[in-house]
Image: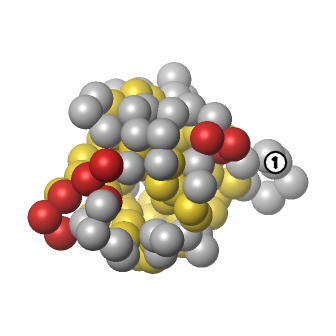
Amino acid sequence: QVQLVESGGGLVQAGGSLRLSCAASGRTFSSYGMGWFRQAPGKEREFVGAINWRTYYADSVKGRFTISRNNAKNTVYLQMNSLKPEDTAVYYCAASALGGTNLAAREYDYWGQGTQVTVSS
């Protein structure tokens, strides 16, 4: 069982930056593939990025967002730069027992409660 808790969301102006954190419980964190997803009002949840031994990003965030992980701290991060109003959403971290870098939500076994990110124009 893995519990995930996101933090770091908030309100930021367009062009600004935020860093989200996702703290995980459990002693096998390093074996999980970790991902970030987001869901805007009225839209489906979408993939943002994933990390295990490599990283992978959605085209919409490539070059602006960076995922990293600290296995010693059981934490994964999402550094978001050059934010745009269209980045406004609830951001979720997720853990996949498959390991690897997984793009589909169905490949993830555990989810956090989400953290709101709002980018004003």
Q: Residue lying farthest left? A: 72
For the C terminus, the image quarter is bottom right
User: Looking at the image, which residue is at 56% across and 62% down?
Assistant: 110
User: Looking at the image, which residue is at 48% across and 54% down?
Assistant: 95
Label 1 residue SS: loop
In the rendered image, the vertical position of residue 83 relative to residue 119, given as above or below: above
Residue 75: quarter of image: bottom left
In the rendered image, the vertical position of residue 58 relative to residue 105, given as above or below: above
Residue 64: quarter of image: top left
User: Which percent across, then down, holds residue 4?
Assistant: 46, 71
User: Which percent across, then down, holds residue 72?
Assistant: 13, 64
Q: Residue lying farthest right? A: 42
Q: Nearer the viewer, residue 81 or 43?
A: 43
Q: Amino acid at mark 1?
A: Lys
The residue indicated by pointer 1 is 43
Q: Residue lying farthest top? A: 59
Q: Nearer the viewer, residue 93 or 25?
A: 25
In the rendered image, the vertical position of residue 1 relative to residue 34, given as above or below: below
User: Looking at the image, which residue is at 56% across and 32% down?
Assistant: 103
Categorize mark 1 by other alpha carbons within 10 Å: few (<14), some (14-19), many (20+): few
Whether residue 63 is visible, yes or no, is yes
Whether residue 121 is visible, yes or no, is no
Q: Nearer the viewer, residue 87 or 112?
A: 112
